[in-house]
Image (spheres, rainbow, N blue to C red):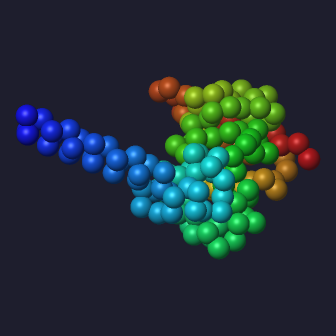
Amino acid sequence: MKKVLLAAALASAAFSAHAASSDQWFYDGMAWYEHPCSLGAFAKYGHDDSPAVRHAYEITKHDSAQCSELFPTGPDRLGLSLSPSMAVEDASGPAARAGIHAGDVVLAVDGIPLESAVVLRPFENVTGTVALLIRRGDDTFYVPVVLED
């Protein structure tokens, strides 16, 4: 009986430790409710340990005015809503018209490899056409996306 109780206590402690760490940025940073950016930013980027996201996290800890720019949670100007792994969650506007679908993975834009959606921010001001390198299943191909002025 003591072994069963000890096992239950250890399992409970392990579960509590895991649950406590899951509400922290990168599992070792601030809890989502302590950071000035919203729960939406944490839900989308909180466990993306890429250098770009860590850098944005540090900036926004001290300058909350940059949260919406550095942690976009809705579709960008391309019409893409991306997961931290750069998988398309939703495509609208220019991206949808170009044939990009949910589930596609964005690998690069105009030849620049993407490690996080934060890297796409400079392309918000571009006019004309950008080339997105897309992986769909086993296929990899470029898709030209025409941005509206």
The reply, left or right, for residue 14 in relation to residue 2 is: right
* Most foreground residue, 79 or 62: 62
The answer to whether residue 52 is visible is no
Residue situated in front as seen by the camera: 144 or 10: 10
Q: How far across and how far down the image is residue 40, in percent?
A: 64, 47
101 sits to left or right of 58: right
Q: x%, y% of residue 8? A: 20, 38
Q: Residue at x 71, y 39 (%)?
A: 80
Instruction: Write down the quadrant of residue 60 in the picture.
Output: bottom right
Q: Is residue 105 visible?
A: yes
The residue most toward the front is 1
Q: How many marks?
A: 0
Spot occupied by residue 102 in the image (x, y as percentages of width and height)? 63, 28
Q: Residue at x 42, y 61 (%)?
A: 28
Is residue 13 positioned above or below 26 on the image? above
The quarter in which the N terminus is drawn is: top left
Q: Residue visible at 8% across and 39% down?
A: 2
Query: Which residue occupies the foreground of this view, 104 or 128?
Result: 104
Q: Residue furthest right?
A: 149
Residue 74, percent from left and from top: 73, 43
In which quarter of the view is residue 86 placed?
top right
Q: Residue at x 65, y 63 (%)?
A: 36
